[in-house]
Amino acid sequence: MQIWRIAITNQDPALNNVNSKLGAQIANLRKSNGLSQSELGKAMASNRPQAWISSIESGRQAIKISDLAQISDALGTTIVEIISSLRDQSIRDEERLTDIVQDLISRLPIEVPLFRQTDFDDPTPKPVDYEYSSFTTAGTEVLKGSLNRDFLRNDLTTAALIVEKSYSTPRLDPTDILTFSTTVAPHTDDNLVVTDRVVAKLNQAIDGLKTHPGIIVPSGNFEMKLMGQDRISLKPSDYDIVGVLVGRRTLYPTSLRRDWLHRRFGITKDETYGIDAG
């Protein structure tokens, strides 16, 4: 005759876990009934010793269905109620773990890779640093991509760029940090003050770089103007949009990162550039 067991072997971690949880549930029910291990053993039809009850409650020994039926009778309950309460406890444990994980995610900063403008001319750019934002302000869209540090996997939705040139259109300075989204389509407006700013990769280099910030005008052209140079307007066939700007951070002279950019890469902002001394 085949004997069915709730758990069969101590070599399977999953079954060991079931043994432990089932044993703990039996111990809880025994204590709530005010019984000792010896008293529970004696109340069973098979009259089990205290050591056997102890091995069951500790999870060291698997339990037969017939023994579980005797234990449930001695405790004034049923096998179904014992198993159901065990399942309910497992669900509560899983829910608590899910809550902990979600709470942890909500507190972790979102990591956004930071690239030099020069590096974007490289087909395989590598970040030089990282920008961080809270989950609540950056949102899940940023989370999906920016936790992956490999920019080349095409699942990066947000990145940041260090400006290395001085621009009058759009008005940007070296060491400015531009955060851009690769999933947002640019919105154009006749009013150039409110039209979207973008990062674009040009077919031909301008002032030694192919990657530049600029604006998209209603015609679809990309426009930019470097300080001291003529305004440039390029047809859609002459550039590709890398991303739409969603934020700009200006670093002032007391900024440690600005000092680091100067010492490490020679990126320097002239606070007086373009200002009329008269």
Image (spheres, helix red, strand yellow):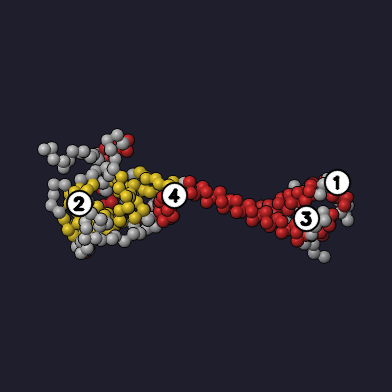
Q: Residue at x 44, y 49 (%)?
A: 135
Q: Verify CB contact (< 8 Å) between mark 1 and mark 2.
A: no
Q: For residue 123, which quarter of the picture?
A: bottom left
Q: CA distance from mark 1 to mark 2?
A: 86 Å
Residue 20 image offset from top left, x and y in percent: 71, 50
Q: Residue at x 37, y 45 (%)?
A: 131
Residue density around tag 1, few if under 14, some if 14–19, many if 20 or more, within 10 Å? some
Q: CA distance from mark 2 to mark 3?
A: 77 Å
Q: Residue at x 47, y 46 (%)?
A: 108
Whether residue 67 sits left or right of residue 241 in the image: it is right
Tell me the quadrant of the picture where the N terminus can be found.
Answer: bottom right
Q: Which residue is mark 2?
A: 169
Viewer-closest of 115 and 213: 213
Give the mark nearest the N terminus, 3 or 1.
1
Can the viewer see residue 89? yes
Give the mark nearest the N terminus, 2 or 3.
3
Q: Which residue is mark 1?
A: 38
Q: Which residue is mark 4?
A: 135
Whether residue 245 sits left or right of residue 36 in the image: it is left
Q: Nearer the viewer, mark 3 or mark 1?
A: 1
Q: Verify CB contact (< 8 Å) between mark 2 and mark 3.
A: no
Mark 3 residue type: Ile
Q: Nearer the viewer, mark 2 or mark 3?
A: 2
Q: CA distance from mark 3 to mark 1?
A: 17 Å
Q: Which residue is mark 3?
A: 63
Viewer-closest of 29 and 4: 29
Can the viewer see residue 239? no
Q: For residue 14, which quarter of the picture?
A: bottom right
Q: Residue at x 19, y 48 (%)?
A: 168
Q: Secondary structure at mark 3?
A: loop
